[in-house]
Amino acid sequence: MRTARISVAGDLLERVSYKAEIDLCDEGKIKMLDAYTRIKPLDHVQFTIGQMRVPFTIDAHRSPHQQYFANRSFIAKQVGNVRDVGATIGYTTGWGVLQAGLFNGSGLTNQKDFWTKSINFSAKAQFFIPGGGSVALSMQKIRPEEVTIMMYDAGAFYHKNGWHLEAEYLLKHYAHGAFQNVHAVDAFVSREIQLSEAAQHATRNLVKSVSPLLRYDFMSDHSDGTIHDDTGLLGIDDHQRHRLTGGVTISLGKPFVSDIRLNYEKYFYKDGSLAKTSERDKLVVEVMTRF
């Protein structure tokens, strides 16, 4: 079971909303993901406080049902995947969205007193381009243990007439040369093809659309920022690799509501012996249903 999430969200008052999201099966563990309150003092301004996804990157912000592929990109899974406790302020207008926030710094652990040692921040600006495009720039400071890490991300996507093209680059810098800079890239294209009435009838109205898709992503040697031994140095958690993912998504209703994802992943390592069991060539079949 890859993901089994329960999410509850709604409006308490005209300008006060909430969200609570729990993952009942994250590799066999139960995790509280989101638990926050959002207040809108003005029509275009919102203030959010609680536990949340930090405003950073494009792909890491997608929930599992919004992902285009069965497995997340390296940016979304290893390099830029951050949730934390804190507060953000956001401004939304016709040309884009601006977000910035302060966080306690430890991720989802050690929340009681970590803020006395380090305050983290994150900022993201997303600009809408007429015709279906968007450009996003973001930066973030984290300090999982003793090493301060700065991350910078730039990405863009185009979505129109069933096409979705996206590219994103992330740079991760460790203070005092504690670890070499990490570079990560994610680029993919997807084409949603609506079935004709005759084709839908042939499938007994089960299949509504088919989306072939192709992705390339890359990640250099990566450390999550935690110290693993007595040397006081950061070690490699994920070895450098390239990956090509191709496949097709069969949508039984609207996309991201009930999908069957068929993907084949081809990995390229400097040394094949470095590959983890879950990070090797594989065929993935995933059924996703959201209700």
Image: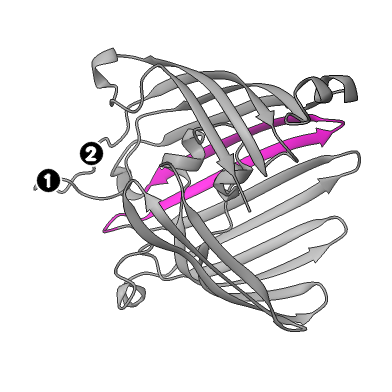
Residue placed most toward the observer, 49 or 13: 13
* Res. 229 mark: 1
* Res. 235 mark: 2
Evaluate if marks 2 and 1 touch, with contact meaning CB atoms under 8 Å apart.
Answer: yes
Image location of residue 219, percent across then percent down: 44, 29
Image location of residue 61, percent across then percent down: 58, 50
On-image quarter of the N terminus:
top left
Residue type of the residue flagged with mark 1: Asp
4 lies left or right of 69: left
* Res. 164 mark: none
Residue placed most toward the observer, 272 or 163: 163
| 166 part of magenta stretch | yes
205 lies left or right of 189: right
Q: Residue at x 40, y 37 (%)?
A: 181
Question: Does residue 197 sit above or below 134 in this rendering?
Answer: above
Q: Which residues are magenta?
A: 145-174
